[in-house]
Image (tube, grey):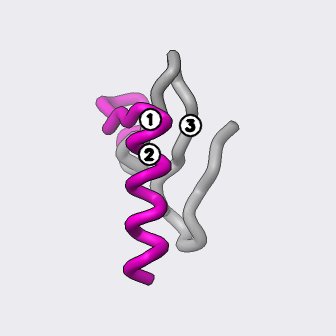
Amino acid sequence: MRRRGRRPGGPAVRPLNGVVAVPDSKDPAGPALAFTPAAWRAFVAELAERA
């Protein structure tokens, strides 16, 4: 599963070994931010509240 934000060039989000990985769109093979699924859900919920 790979998802992109609504804006072109947005981050690609993908599950990876039990975590949600958010790589740099300019260097997708490089390091990525890693969230537990629960932390990712909390992050997305907080963004939705602020939108």
Residue 21 marker: 1
Give the residue drawn at x 46%, y 59%: 44
Q: Amino acid at mark 1?
A: Ala
* Residue nearest the observer in this picture, 6 or 30: 6
SS under mark 1: strand
Give the residue drawn at x 35%, y 33%: 34
Residue 44 marker: none
What number of labels is visible? 3
Q: Which residue is mark 2?
A: 40
First in sequence: mark 2 or mark 1? 1
Image quadrant assignment for residue 32: top left
- Judged by depth in the image, the label closer to the viewer, 3 or 2, is 2
Span highlighted in magenta in the image: 27-51
C-alpha separation, residue under disc 3 versus residue under disc 1:
5 Å
Q: Position of residue 49 (x, y in %)?
A: 43, 76
Task: Name the quarter where the N terminus is drawn.
Answer: top right
Residue furthest out toward the top = 17
Image position of 40 (left or right of 1): left
Residue furthest out toward the bottom = 51
SS under mark 2: helix
CB atoms of marks 3 and 1 within 8 Å: yes
Q: Amino acid at mark 3?
A: Arg
First in sequence: mark 3 or mark 1? 3
Q: Is residue 20 magenta?
A: no
Q: Is residue 33 magenta?
A: yes
Q: Position of residue 20 (x, y in %)?
A: 48, 35
Q: Amino acid at mark 2?
A: Trp
Q: Position of residue 36 (x, y in %)?
A: 41, 32
Q: Which residue is mark 3?
A: 14
* Residue nearest the observer in this picture, 46 or 7: 46
First in sequence: mark 3 or mark 2? 3
Q: Position of residue 28 (x, y in %)?
A: 43, 37
